Image (cartoon, helix red, strand yellow):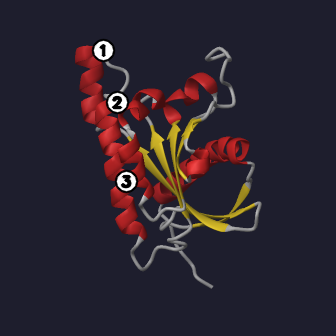
Amino acid sequence: MRVIFLSDREIGKKQDEESELKLFKREYERITGFSFEIIDRTERPDFIVQRSDGTQLGIELTKVMCNPNSAFWARVLNGEEQADPVDTAIHLQEAIYRKDVKCSEHDWKLSKRTILLLQLMDSLIDQVISFLDVQIIKEINKTGFFEIWIGDYSILEAYGTIQLYGIKPKKWQGLHDHLNTGKKPYG
């Protein structure tokens, strides 16, 4: 039996990740028809889950956001509440390629069956995806991930949910309405 000691900060981080995963799970189930249950909390990837079709998958959560210091000054000096969508699209691509390299390292569990969830924290998904053309999507699809999703967490406060954009596999590619689409924000 393996015993792991976690600091309070590490425990808090895992709890936050689990809350963020629950939001993804609800939308993922609605879109794909597959439910999943957490069977292990790890680091590489963040979670091991059992999907309703019996497939064991890893799920890696990756936040895509601008530097908090830059965001503060953009808000103070220019009144900007959202990060620049072009910068976010670039950061998103960089994050995918960086995680793809890490996923191929020897200590990554389920490296060929990992779902990558890129979490947009300060950008609206519909603005960011306009900068991901067909060629970029094709290139991203060549990475080793089992599935790739972009989750718009910036709408969480207003709608109580997230919105997903599927990159891989092709059958779920595109922007999907969220659970509360058509409802008033904060409503």
Q: Earlier in the sequence, mark 2 or mark 1?
A: 1
Q: CA distance from mark 1 to mark 3?
A: 35 Å
Q: Residue at x 62, y 25 (%)?
A: 159
Residue 8: where, in percent of width, then height? 49, 57
Q: Quadrant of the N terminus?
A: bottom right
C-beta proximity under 8 Å, tags 1 and 3: no
Quick check: marks 2 and 1 in contact, CB under 8 Å? no
The residue labelled by disc 3 is 139
Quadrant of res 99: bottom left
Specify whether 55 is left or right of 166: right
At x 25%, y 15%, the residue is 78
Which quarter of the image is occupied by the C terminus?
Answer: top right
Looking at this view, is 60 or 34 the one in front?
A: 34
Q: What residue is shown with label 2?
A: 85
- At label 3, the amino acid type is Glu
Residue at image mark 1: 79
Q: What is the three-letter code of the residue carrying label 1?
A: Gly
Residue 185 at x, y percent in the picture: 61, 17
At mark 1, the secondary structure is loop
Q: Nearer the viewer, mark 3 or mark 2?
A: 3
Q: Is residue 87 left or right of residue 59?
A: left
**Which residue appears farthest toward the bottom when viewing the image?**
1
